[in-house]
Image (spheres, helix red, strand yellow):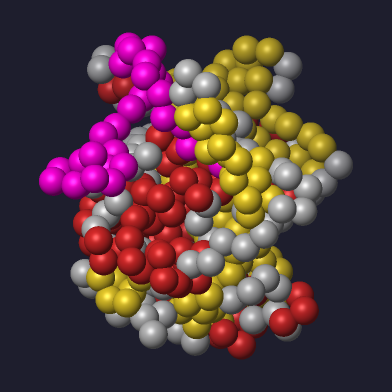
Amino acid sequence: MKFLLMPYLVQKAVLERMGLLELFDVTRLSKRMRNKVKNDVRIRNVDFDVHIGNDVTFFFVTTEDRTHIGTFNVETIPLEDLPESTDRNIGDLNIDHPPLSICPCIKKVPSLGSEIYKRFDFTRLSKRMRNKVKNDVWIRKVELAVFIDNDVTFYFTTTEDGASVCTFNVEPLSELPPLEDRPELIDRNIGGELSRVASALWETGDGGPWMSFHLNDYLQGARTLYEELVEIFSVSAIRGTLNLELAGNDYRPAVNLFNELRPRWILVEGENVDFEAYMWTLEHLSSSKQLGYEVKPTEYLDLGMPALDHEEVIIQHGFWVRPQHLEVLSAVKSIEFEDSSFTGNEINEFLLRLKSGSYPNLESACFYLRGNFGDQVVLDGLNAIEKDEFDYIIEFDNGDSCEFAFTVDESGQGIEIKIKRMKNENQ
């Protein structure tokens, strides 16, 4: 039988996964919660030893090998010598004033990944505990990234070096691994109406722990979970990756979910993608700071170029892009096309238009071609000043200028253009 506290289901399986110190704090919340833990949670194969000297200490150890798993200590000590402290209800000593508190073992984390899960599970206990964690517990130097393919994964990583901290994953119930290949499932409350969702906690070694949720409408589950993570931990998706190949027929709802999450840096990848899906996704992605489009289509069709509202656009398989397509990229500050089909004459035409005032927002452009072109074809009519070998400067009609350099690698020739705007210099 489940025990309803506030709007959340307090689930026995969730309580059983908590450590001794966390369970003790749960019992401090209310008399009803104390009875819930007392009646539903059984701690097996555990002893405790008592040491009495100038203080009293209770040591909890395993019965099998006496491994230490938790300590409670009662002593007299000056407050200034304590680490961060909080009022806590021991029992009759504070029966008239049972404050809601978060113990230091939740605030000071030895393993950030596992503690994020503990905090998440704490917020499932009651609305009051959810608000307490949300308001009083801060996670610093951590970012959130999202990966969407045939499921949805949220990665917590460190801001310093991008190291993985922990992972939340939402996938279709049909993809649930067989019993022998997964941990025990419990019902967890994702949020909203999704109060009983099959969930497991995995240990993945170097990648940090991983909490998975399994339900039929995994996109709605991911949407609800993301809202909870953002509200509880005050962190939103900075980077996002979408794999069109693995998303398959769900690519449109996957793109719509991606747009709701609005990551600032977007990477879209995949091979053997239908060109219609390729172009629909390119057209419907919401604006971002950077769009990296590394999708390889099955064919190239002349479907035009949608107007893109990203600061920077990088298209890896850009053979289909033609010079006239650049006219709709007026909002883009930086463009890069790899595997380009541009010719030397077309690059020359682009530079002439740039010199005369077209593409006023553009600050850099790079074209990496499949083949080679003659440098003089590109330079024709530009009155370019040679700064160094393969390195030139062009003065624009409006006072702006650009510097460009020819490049050569194993795939062919390229040109890298950096534009110096007078308006930027005067700001």
* The residue stretch that appears in magenta: 70-98
Residue 370: x and y in percent read 76, 51
Identify the image quadrant of residue 103. top left
Residue with the most extreme left position = 96
- Number of labelled discs? 0
What residue appears at the point 25 percent right and 61 percent down from the top-left corner? 31
Q: Nearer the viewer, residue 401 or 55?
A: 55
What residue appears at the point 23 percent right and 39 percent down from the top-left corner? 93
Q: Nearer the viewer, residue 415 or 149?
A: 149
Horizontal placement of 180 versus 405: left or right? Answer: right
Residue 111: x and y in percent read 58, 40
Residue 416: x and y in percent read 61, 33
Query: Is residue 427 placed above or below 33 in the rendered structure?
Result: above
Residue with the most extreme front position = 52
Q: Nearer the viewer, residue 217 or 297?
A: 217
- Residue 116 seen in the current view: no
